[in-house]
């Protein structure tokens, strides 16, 4: 009985993975706005009716796929999240995983963050990163501590910075490794985050 309940889930995951891979490959080949559902199903070798069992349209496939990928990144990051003590001691704030993810899908991001991309995509990414960062910052704060700036605003600023940094990196053909990019972001954001949280004076 347990086995029979697991098989459909694996099939669903496989189908969604095939559709996601097909979409990302097509975006790299021909841009986003030129892609049809038929293009995706042909590339994935999946029937159109199957596509519509999972997604409403191309936008839905894109946003659902990116949400799954970002959720995986965020889950891995939370396995060893930054703490106030880490930041005060100069330990990394930025995640190398984020830059490695962008490097893996460089052609996709190069298109989606260009004039041939999608503003809706950038808005969704901004919203997701803002929510994730606000949640993380809230975990870092000592009980009862009030930051010098509202956390939703600080989270939005940090999300905007990350998107801007990724765009610069992609548009300049990634001149630095993911590790170097993460270190440079730490130099910029580490002390700034502490200052805005009102904890800079406690830095050792």
Image (cartoon, rainbow, N blue to C red):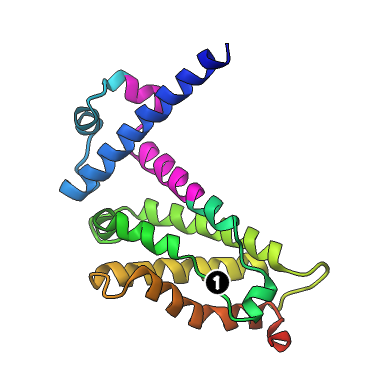
- Position of 74 relative to 82 (above/below): above
Image coords of residue 49 (percent x, y): 31, 18
Range of the magenta residues? 50-72
Q: Is residue 196 left or right of residue 185?
A: right
The answer to which image quadrant residue 182 occupies is: bottom left
Question: Image check: 82 left or right of 101?
Answer: right
Q: Main secondary structure of the magenta part?
A: helix
- Please give the name of the residue rendered at 67% of the width and 69% of the height, measured from the top-left corner: 83
Residue displayed at 53% across by 78% down: 189
Q: Looking at the rendering, which quadrant does residue 134 occupy?
A: bottom right
Q: Quadrant of residue 85?
A: bottom right
Q: Is residue 86 left or right of residue 13?
A: right
Camera-side residue of 201 and 64 = 201
**Residue occupying the far right of the picture:** 144
Residue 106: % across, % down: 27, 58
The residue at the point 65 percent across, 83 percent down is 195
Q: Residue furthest left?
A: 30
- From the top left corner, tell me how far across and down residue 156 is, in percent: 55, 66
Q: Is residue 53 magenta?
A: yes
Q: Is residue 56 magenta?
A: yes
24 over 38 or under it: above or below: below
For the point 52% across and 70% down, the residue is: 158
Q: Using the rendered image of the protein, determine whether residue 55 is visible from the camera's viewpoint.
A: no
Q: Can you see residue 17?
A: yes
Q: For mark 1, what is the residue?
A: 93
Quarter holding the C terminus?
bottom right
């Amino acid at each position: 009985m347990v086995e029979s309940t697991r098989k459909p889930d694996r099939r669903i995951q496989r189908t969604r993975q095939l559709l996601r891979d097909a979409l990302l490959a097509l975006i790299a080949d021909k841009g986003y706005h030129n892609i049809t559902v038929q293009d995706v199903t042909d590339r994935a070798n999946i029937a159109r009716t199957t596509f519509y069992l999972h997604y409403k349209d191309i936008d839905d496939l894109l946003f659902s796929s990116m949400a799954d990928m970002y959720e995986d990144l965020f889950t891995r990051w939370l396995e060893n999240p930054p703490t106030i003590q880490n930041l005060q001691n100069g330990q990394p704030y930025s995640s190398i995983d984020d830059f490695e993810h962008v490097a893996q899908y460089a052609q996709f991001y190069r298109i989606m963050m260009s004039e041939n991309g999608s503003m809706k995509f950038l808005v969704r990414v901004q919203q997701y990163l803002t929510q994730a960062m606000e949640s993380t910052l809230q975990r870092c704060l000592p009980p009862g501590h009030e930051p010098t700036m509202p956390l939703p605003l600080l989270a939005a600023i940090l999300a905007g910075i990350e998107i801007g940094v990724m765009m610069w990196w992609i548009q300049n053909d990634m001149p630095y490794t993911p590790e170097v990019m993460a270190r440079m972001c730490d130099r910029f954001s580490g002390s700034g985050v502490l200052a805005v949280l009102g904890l800079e004076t406690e830095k050792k």
